[in-house]
Image (cartoon, grey):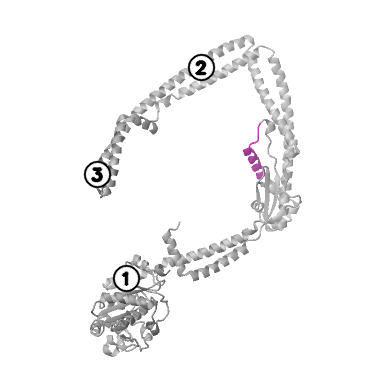
Amino acid sequence: MVSPSVSSALFKAFRRRWLLASTLGLLVGGFVGALLWSLLPEQYSAEVRLRIPAPDRASAGGSTSEEEIARFQRAQAALIQSSTVLEAVLRQPEVAELPTVQRERDPLAWLENHLTVEGGSLPGILSIRVTSANADETAVLARAIVEVYVREVAGQREASLRRLKEARGKTEETLRQKRQRLAQLENTRLGAAEKECQQARFDLRVARAQLAAQERRRTEVDRVTVKDAAVLAYLKEDALNQKLSKELTAAEEQIKQLIRVSVLKEGDPRLLEFQRVREEAKQKQERRRKEVVPIVEQQMRMRASEEYQTRVNQLRERAAFYEGLVKSLEEEVQKLGGAAAGEESRTLREEIATDNETLRKLTVEIARAENPATIPSVVSASGEMPAVQPKNPQRRWQLAGLGGAGSCALFVLALSWQELRLRRITSGSDIIGGLGLPVVGNIPNVRSGRKTTLKDLEEQGSISEAVDALRTVLLRDSGNGPRLLLVTSAIGREGKTALAVRLAASLARAWRKTLFIDADLRKPEAHTLFDMPLEPGLSEVLRGEADVSEIIQPTELSRLWMIPAGHWDAHAIQALAQDGAGGLFTRLKEQFDFIVIDACPVLPVADALLLCTHVNSVLLAVRSGVSHLPIVHAAQQRLATVEAPLRGVVLMGPDADLHG
């Protein structure tokens, strides 16, 4: 399961790239759906329903259970799917000529995979279903399978009927002979006496077997296993254990009461004494339990020994009784004609009873085998050809649709997950929670890639109001003295130049004499906004080729001046690294209330880090939906290495938490 926070983050990631993800996802889903549609051929199904008579046990003195019926139907289904029947089907001329059968390398395996036999909705019904890509071939195969199966069942029925009749004849002759011999033996008194003697012998064997089994259990009496239930039952009645239980319960109640009323809760030192009492009570209970185990074991052993001895005595008395009875009956049998004749009479009776039951079952089986209703029959439509219809015609559309929709969803999910892994910043909460930096401003509706114009600086709107709110924060920080403010970003295209220019214009509108310095020497852009030449500028001042008073240019906005970047080279960067800007800023602070510096990004080059040592505040521009949290964090760390006075972050673009 996906946690709500991850789901919310995925949704935000999808919202940032919804157009690209939806367009490509629909294209991928459409392609996969079309591919599945073309790869899934139309399948046809021919079904024949057979009535399979279940074995009738009612006439045999029993009843046919549902389990027996289900077992018989499974056996018939296995027969239909057996290699014997299917090989016979494939040998049929009309089947062997089918193109599909001739094309398959292993026709038997193919037929097994495309044949289904299952129970129908009604009892005693089997459904035979064959699927194939050709409707006519499907019907031919289904009809051939039914014909071969019915022929196989008929052959098995004839062979079984022949064997049953032969067995019945032999059983009748054997039964007649045994009855004649038994009649001869039963004419004497010997038969009755022998029956009683045999019954007494049987009872004696049973008594001796029970006695021997009981005597073998003697060792079990000594191996008594003390169960926890017996120990617990003894402890329940034990006075000492009851006292310990009350002590333990009282200690636990005191602990709960103290936690409930104490201000310190679990940290209250008074708990230690109650906890010690509780632990001592538990230890005493455990020791008492160990003391009780031998006592319970001894009681159980004594009780088991008494029960064992009582049972043995009863069985010995019973065995002695039957020994005397057998002895007296054997003497009587000897007087009447010998034990051999009595044993023969008993054996004949048992065999006659068994033969009678066998003969009855054979008669029932023969009657059932001769019944025409036991032959399987077709209960499908009256036509000779099985009904053929497309196999689940909606399945092809469903699979194609599911495949396409699943592919689209997976693609959108993968793209959203990739977007989530980039950890783009979309709201102030991302900055506060991920970086621990304050968000001092949010400049909405600033689109990436759009150049700021002079007209934008003069117009009033949501952007100007947001910049003015940021200006208010900076004016409160600055007090009455001059203020040097540096605006930078982690990397390029995060809106730092637009922020710096708009902030400088806002300060000028607030009647602050403001100087804007384009210190992004390697990629200057601000001079194009004010329609000024690139040079001379800051680079020429750093190289000593121009004086700062010569390069300060007034802009079309009242109270706003600008120093362009100039033409940079290695010498200008070296001068900047050698603290060439320190004296410059000292002179400029005497002339202006606010100096806004547009610096290079922090991570690509070190120019911004060199300038940070001379300013009062640093603003880090972050573009919503473009900036990545790890990259901004890296910039924050680099600024921290030079102890830059980072005032906070300005989010360029709409805050998803506020404007979503």
Q: Main structural element of the magenta stretch: helix, strand or loop?
A: helix
Are the residues flagged by discs 3 and 1 in contact, CB closer than 8 Å?
A: no
In the image: residue 113, left or right of residue 363: left
| Residue at the image position 28 percent from the left and 90 percent from the top | 550
Q: Is the N terminus in the top left, top right, bottom left or bottom right quadrant?
A: bottom left
Number of numbered discs: 3
Residue position for label 3? 272
Horizontal side of 411 relative to 352 (left or right) equals left
Task: Give the structural element (helix, strand or loop) at label 3.
Answer: helix
Q: Position of residue 247 (x, y in %)?
A: 28, 36
Q: Is residue 627 above or below residue 44?
A: below
Q: Earlier in the sequence, mark 2 or mark 3?
A: 3
Task: Judge by depth and name the residue closer to the eye, 31 or 250.
Answer: 250
Asked if residue 478 can be seen in this view, the reply is yes
Label 1 secondary element: helix
In the rendered structure, the answer to whether residue 547 lies left or right of residue 416 reads left
Q: Mark 2 = which residue? A: 318
Image x and y of residue 40, in percent: 62, 61
Between the residue at mark 3 and the residue at mark 1, the CA separation in whole angstroms equals: 49 Å
| Residue 205 on image: x %, y % | 54, 20
**Pointer 1 residue:** 636
Q: Earlier in the sequence, mark 2 or mark 1?
A: 2
Image-based side of 572 in relation to 463, left or right:
left
**380 shown above or below 63:** below
Q: What is the crowding at mark 3: few (fewer than 14 residues within 10 Å), some, or many (at least 20)?
A: few
Task: Name the residue type under label 3.
Answer: Leu
Local secondary structure at mark 2 = helix
Of badges 2 and 3, the one in the foreground is 3
Read off the magenta span: 62-79
Q: What is the distance, in whole Å, between disc 2 and disc 1 at their CAs? A: 100 Å
**Mark 2 residue type:** Arg
Of label 3 and label 1, which has the lower sequence position?
3
